[in-house]
Amino acid sequence: MHGLRWRVTVAFGLLSLAVSAVLSLLIWSVLSSYLVAQRESLAVAEGELGRTVIEEGLVSRAGLVTAPLDGLPTTRSTASLCLVGGQWYSTSPRVPASSLPTALVDAVTRGEESTQRVELDGGLVLAVGMPLTPARSGLFEIFPLTDLDQTLRTLSTALVLGAAATALLGAALGRSASRLALRPLREMGSVAAAVAEGRLDARLQTGSDPDLGPLGASFNQAVAELEHRVAADARFAVDVSHELRTPLTTMLNSMQVIKHREASLPASVREPLDLLAEELERFRRLVVDLLEMARHDAGQGLVLEEVNLADLVRAAADQTAGRAVTDPARPLMTRVDKRRLERVVANLVSNAESHGGGVVAVRLLRRGPVARIEVDDAGPGVAPDQRARIFDRFSRGAGPGDPAGLGLGLAIVQRHVALHGGSVAVEDRPGGGARFVVELPISEA
């Protein structure tokens, strides 16, 4: 599918071609008709002069035709033929009387002036016939049309080239005009892309254009409303999370007290108590994740410091998994937000432990100016049509071994990695399972 700019360019080119073609045909018709009529007019005038000479010669030379015929003025004609008393006379053996059209000869012998274009020796000529005073007599002069034909060919070539050049010029003008006309749309597309990336402070320059100004103002108003709502939602999430922390802390502390006295509780109460403790821990993680997302939505910036990325990845992964899961890696110094990146690694390992059948390996590799963190699991993998959706907030997995898949862990991973200017994706692990890949630009001091 071609773009709007391409279609505008083609439309301008075709319009220019159509206009130039019509003008070329009009010019060709007028000029060719004029040149042919001019040539016929000159040929007829010369034929009339030749008729006068022949008739005077016939009177003064008592019917002799040869001498007057040879004395005809020949400015443009190549041959002259004369029919007198049923006898043909010619100034050129190359043009016999049989080459003249019968219709032309009949018209002249009936006393009519006549002209006709004839094919002679592979070339086009103009035959002019003038009746003479003796009955059924006539003078015929042959005028070549080679130079006229060449002129018309040159004219047609020039008109065709002119039409082609006009079409190309029209296409160039259309491209330039489309670039100018579509500039506001490109600017709007850039601002819309910035808004889609989360830069809600991006705005259009409305200017004073009476046609585009209202559109730009409406767009800016919509983005401002969106920014206001996102900020309000972020503040609400922060406030709610903070309000939840106090009762949550009380419940957790109470649960710890009860767990310390678990031995004195009846056996029928211990199983519900364990379920309650598990749900409280899950509730705690959810509140922590909500606070993390709220900080991100509120625009909290990075706190960069120089760290050894290999040590950071190993400590976060092994501590989260509760065992050594990190492959040995060379030291790699770079500037990152340590807290956020530790959270990235911890969330990926926790996700693999909870939903991916357990962590198989965690690796840190360097690929030129990019640091690559790989987290492999032993689960069923992630279907290609779900690989983008699993990074959404509260995404619900559809894997056969995934009981719920409800949470914010992977959404936090994506946002923290994006703040570092990196990317996160999920691939198939060789041998089965999923491989989560984080790529971060290396910022060396």
Image (cartoon, rainbow, N blue to C red):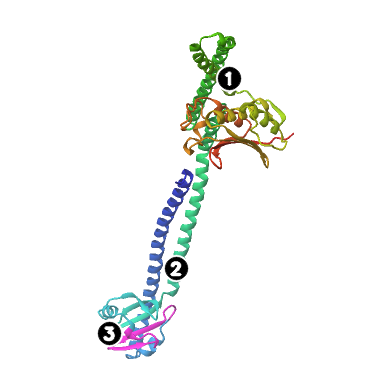
Q: Which residue is drawn at 25% across and 79% down?
A: 110
User: Does residue 26 appear in this view?
Assistant: yes
Q: Do the residues labelled 1 and 2 touch (CB within 8 Å)?
A: no
Q: Residue 134 carries which label?
A: 3
Front residue of 16 and 399: 399
Point out the stretch of residues depicted in magenta. 74-98
Q: What element carries label 3?
A: loop
Front residue of 171 and 77: 171
Q: How far apart are marks 2 and 3 (CA)?
A: 42 Å
Q: How crowded is mark 3: few (under 14 residues within 10 Å), some or many (20 or more)?
A: some
Residue 81 is inside the magenta segment: yes
- Residue 84 placement, left or right of 193: left
- Give the answer, above or below, for where 344 lies relative to 41: above
Q: How far apart are marks 1 and 2 (CA)?
A: 86 Å
Give percent across and percent down for residue 420.
64, 31
Counting the numbered discs, the total is 3
Q: Which amino acid type is marked by label 1?
A: Val
Q: How crowded is mark 2: few (under 14 residues within 10 Å), some or many (20 or more)?
A: few
Tell which circle, 2 or 3, labels the residue nearer the N-terminal end.
Answer: 3
Q: Which residue lies furthest to the right in this view?
A: 445
Q: In what quadrant of the picture does the C terminus appear?
A: top right
Give percent across and percent down for residue 100.
32, 81
- Give the answer, above or below, for where 391 lies relative to 121: above
Q: Residues within 10 Å of mark 1 (few under 14, many from 20)?
A: some
Pointer 1 residue: 288
Pointer 2 residue: 153
- Residue 328 placement, left or right of 132: right
Q: Which amino acid type is marked by label 3?
A: Pro
